[in-house]
Image (tube, rainbow, N blue to C red):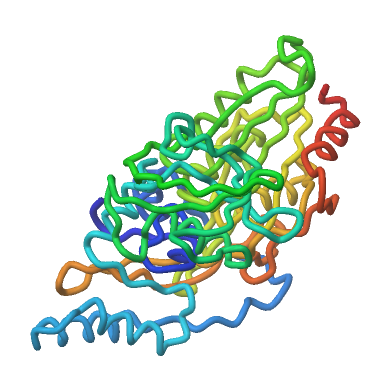
Amino acid sequence: MSGPVHRVGPRGLCRGAALTLVFASVLATGAATGALPRGDGRSPETETRPVASFADRDAVVDAAADAVADGKSGTEAAEEVVSRSGDRWGAVYDEREYQEFEQALDGSYTGVGIAARRSADGLVAVARVQPGSPADRAGIRAGDLIRTVDGHRVDRRPVSDVVALLRGDRTGAAAGSAVVVGVQRGSAGRTETLHRARLTTEAVTVRRLGPDRSDPSAAVLIEVGSFTKGSGAEVRDAVREAPAGTGVLLDLRGNSGGLVTEAVTAASAFLDGGLVATYDVHGEQRALYADGGGDTARPVVVLIDGGTMSAAELLTGALQDRGRAVTVGSRTFGKGSVQMPSKLAGGSVAELTVGHYRTPAGRSVDDRGITPDLAVSARAQQRAETVLSGLGGGS
């Protein structure tokens, strides 16, 4: 990538966390190519903007340059300035971490093929296992509980931390490196040694719901794990290919965000143009708009939870505010900050918060999240299917 790039949301919950990143959305690049229309995009004055501390870009750049000139680590010097600034979502990556981050947005990462979520009893559970991955070959399945990683208990740790441990983000683990995972299925526990591999994410999966999936009236389930490159078009194509009149259950649970351009494309599948979100960069107000021609008649239910973050929250807020979908589940994570990466001396990159985005109705997502229309803590998908059927979307 060349030129300045704006990202909506923070780097992640830990440094170099690749796809555990909460939000990494390329805004400026999209605007430069016409993918993100500019307008006056003034944010509605419906509430006070959240108070946030922004790191001073010049101070971070100067600190890195001075450190490199003195033969020290520019990355560490920049991190110190960012940590003192109060910019809690600011981040500094060394060259390797940033390369991993960029590859993650392309849909590639190093890991074992496990997507995790918080279980109903507060433990860390396997949400999905990527077919053909090290976890799949070891027999780990969705619903298994992750109890330990490399001998350390992870029961109550944040899900993003557990994913980072599995991928070895903090240690820079490469493909082929081993991680020992303790899993539990029912009352039986076991330990598996997995060797990380370079994997390509399957960001979007599509299937029919109901006992007879060959039934043309059956609703369509579209699961979006993250908004990597091309995922928005996959959502759009899945909606276009669904038989007329069938409903769509859009599952954004555990979606850690991704490229906002892809989230806008996904929104365009359900909207006939119009506002998707507004955002500000250093106080300058801008707007994101859906493309015309989307399906505005098909019933839609969106499944969300505490793992629904950033770009996924932007999409959820747009469909909810525009009256295009019923949202079911639990309150989303609450990340809606805009960040801009800056190249530093020594090759590292600082991503610093420069603003926030809002939903079409002017709601801030940062630190608030999105409250679903129907709050459900257990059997959320079953409830969502019932809602969709009630909307005339099939079952």
- Does residue 276 show up? no
Query: Toward which corner of the image does residue 248 lie, by quadrant?
Result: top right
* Residue 343 image offset from top left, x and y in percent: 23, 68
* Residue 105 image offset from top left, x and y in percent: 38, 47
Rendered residue at 39%/41% (across/down): 107
Rendered residue at 40%/50% (across/down): 31
* Residue 390 image offset from top left, x and y in percent: 91, 31
Instruction: Tell me the quadrant of the picture where the C terminus can be found.
Output: top right
In the picture provided, is 311 more to the left or to the right than 172? Answer: right
* Front in this rendered view, residue 123 or 14: 123
Q: How many labels does the image show?
A: 0
- Does residue 374 show up? yes
79 lies above or below 209 = below
357 lies above or below 133 = below
Query: Toward which corner of the image does residue 76 lie, by quadrant?
Result: bottom left
* Residue 273 image offset from top left, x and y in percent: 61, 38
Rendered residue at 66%/67% (across/down): 364
Query: Toward which corner of the image does residue 295 lie, by quadrant?
Result: top right
* Front in this rendered view, residue 19 or 181: 181
291 lies above or below 177 = above
Q: Residue furthest right?
A: 390
